[in-house]
Amino acid sequence: MTLFFSLMQAQPGGFQQYGSLIMIVLLFVIMYFFMIRPQNKKQKELRNFRNALKPGQDVVTVGGLHGTVRSIDEGTDTVTLEVATGVKLRFDRASIVPQGETK
């Protein structure tokens, strides 16, 4: 506590300088918890979903095409979807999103 008072006496307007520094740090902390952390968490969940794809799973592409995974080629990172009976299309694994996340 004495350090705080000595800093305030050493510089005129010392509390105002530290007050704005505290506000900047507080703003960054708020941004981290409300923006950065949830976004990182969502990206991690999406990455885990794409890595756990298996044949027979219903998915949606980022373009809105609904289909069922028929095969996965690990070498080229492509997924073959069956969108209708006998209609198979190849997509990049990064263009697949979970069933409930179409926007």
Image: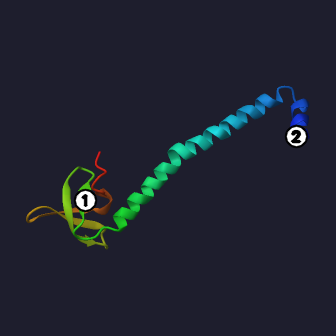
Numbered badge on residue 20: none
Q: Is residue 59 above or below residue 14?
A: below
State how far apart marks 1 and 2 are (Cα): 59 Å
Give the x, y percent position of residue 92: 28, 61
| Near-viewer residue (7 or 100) | 100
Q: Is residue 11 above or below residue 28?
A: above
Please tell me how crowded label 2 is: few (under 14), some (14-19), or many (20+) other residues with Cα within 10 Å: few
Q: Secondary structure at mark 2?
A: loop
Give the x, y percent position of residue 29: 62, 43
Q: Secondary structure at mark 1?
A: strand
Q: Is residue 95 left or right of residue 88?
A: right
Give the x, y percent position of residue 24: 66, 37
At a point 74% along the width and 32% down the height, the residue shown is 19
Q: Earlier in the sequence, mark 1 or mark 2?
A: 2
At a point 77% along the width and 28% down the height, the residue shown is 16
- Locate the C terminus by quadrant: top left
Q: Is residue 13 left or right of residue 77?
A: right
At a point 36% along the width and 67% down the height, the residue shown is 51
Three-letter code, disc 2: Met
- Locate the N terminus by quadrant: top right
Question: Which is more foreground, mark 1 or mark 2?
Answer: 2
Q: Is residue 82 above or below residue 61?
A: below
Check the image and name the residue furthest to the top: 12
Three-letter code, disc 1: Val
Numbered badge on residue 1: 2
| Near-viewer residue (47 or 38) | 38
Q: Which residue is mark 1?
A: 59
Quadrant for residue 55, please give it.
bottom left
Check the image and name the residue furthest to the left: 86
Quadrant for residue 77, please give it.
bottom left
Q: Is residue 18 left or right of residue 54?
A: right
Please tell me how crowded label 1 is: few (under 14), some (14-19), or many (20+) other residues with Cα within 10 Å: many
